[in-house]
Amino acid sequence: MWNLLADVGGTHMRIAAASRAGDILDQKSFPSKGGAGFLSACEAMIAERKSTPAAAVVAAAGVVTNGAVRLTNSDQSFSESDLARVCATADVTILNDFEAAAWSLVSVTDADTTCLQGPVDIPAGPRVIIGPGTGLGVGALIRAHDRPHVIAGEGGHISLSPRSADDLNYFEHLVRLWPDVRMGQGIAVEAEAVLSGTGLPVLYRAIAAVHKTSDEIRNAKQIFDAARAGTDEAAQIAVDLFRRYLGAMAGDLGLVYGASGGVFVTGGLAISNPWIFDQAFLDAFNAGGRHSHWRKQLPLYLYRNSDFGLIGARNYLASRWADDAGQRD
């Protein structure tokens, strides 16, 4: 018997076969854009294994409504009924990708993390995770009645407001380039417009327009590389804003959830660029006005395991089966 686990993001799809105990038996990766769709990739894995899974859990980067999802940053959509048909099982679940990411925190260890603040050994307590990748995800894990519970939401789409006169200028140009991310009539923008691989190139173009410099860089990887090399002023400013606003938002989330069990930063952009987690990032994380001292007590980690979506899907399934067994008893 095996279970199908998947993590379908805006750039990559990871699909795995796992044993009932949760061990990964096989894992494959596909592009989310321009290749075979997710359901076709599932069909291929099932055909290769010559049997259908007992259950399927999918972490998907989009809003899940009534068992269906349309990916926010990829032109794909599917539902639990589609998945049940392909997998020939009624035991199917689609989770938001950062709902699954929060589930991965059930089993996170210090081997998966780099400690940025606080104890190396991860303490018990509420945990929150934030991850800039193609988009921006947020989730939280709490315990109640000695069981893990995840709080899902769309925290990547909360508002960010400019924090300086220079930032105000950059945000004004950003909303001209991308009006859809403007929040109301002010200059606040969706967090994802700054803190994601989709938003960072637009922010870079806005900064280049302010400084009247070239905006020839077109993707987030090039922006990070140029910023680190010091070869492009707009890239350096864009990454500095990314660093500071990510730190501030992570600290805010730590306050919201009382994250004594840790604030975890992950996602493709964070994992690929650990050099940004410097003193400027920590200063932004800990800048809390009257609650700065409280923020400095929050454990903070870079979560380096890029398979957090699959791990979370596995942990969700194990927890649900444990609950089902408890109800039968």
Image (spheres, rainbow, N blue to C red):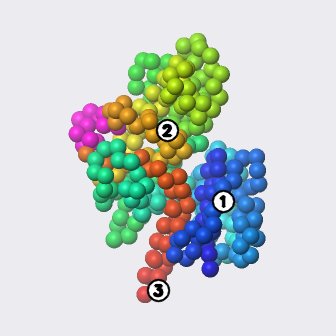
Numbered badge on residue 328? 3
Tell me what residue is drawn at x 41 percent, y 51 percent.
113
Q: Residue at x 36, y 41 (%)?
A: 251
**Which one is in front, 30 or 130?**
30
Residue drawn at x 45%, y 18% is: 166
- Give the SS element for disc 1: strand
The residue sitting at 55% across, 61% down in the picture is: 310
* Res 28 label: 1
Asked if residue 256 can be seen in this view, the reply is no
What's the distance in space between the residues labelled 3 and 1, CA to CA? 35 Å
Query: How far apart, in angstroms, are the residues tagged by discs 2 and 3?
Result: 47 Å
- The reply, left or right, for residue 276 in relation to residue 217 is left
Label 1 amino acid?
A: Lys
| Chief secondary structure of the magenta portion | helix
199 vs 188, nearest the viewer: 199
* Residue projecting furthest to the top: 212
Foreground residue among 288 and 8:
8
Residue 314 magenta-drawn? Answer: no
| Dot placed on the residue nearer the N-terminal end, 2 or 3 | 2
Which numbered disc, 1 or 2, marks the residue that appears first in the sequence?
Answer: 1
Q: Amino acid at mark 3?
A: Arg
Judging from the image, what secondary structure is the residue with disc 3 in?
A: helix
Labels 3, 1: front one = 1
Q: What residue is shown with label 2? A: 273
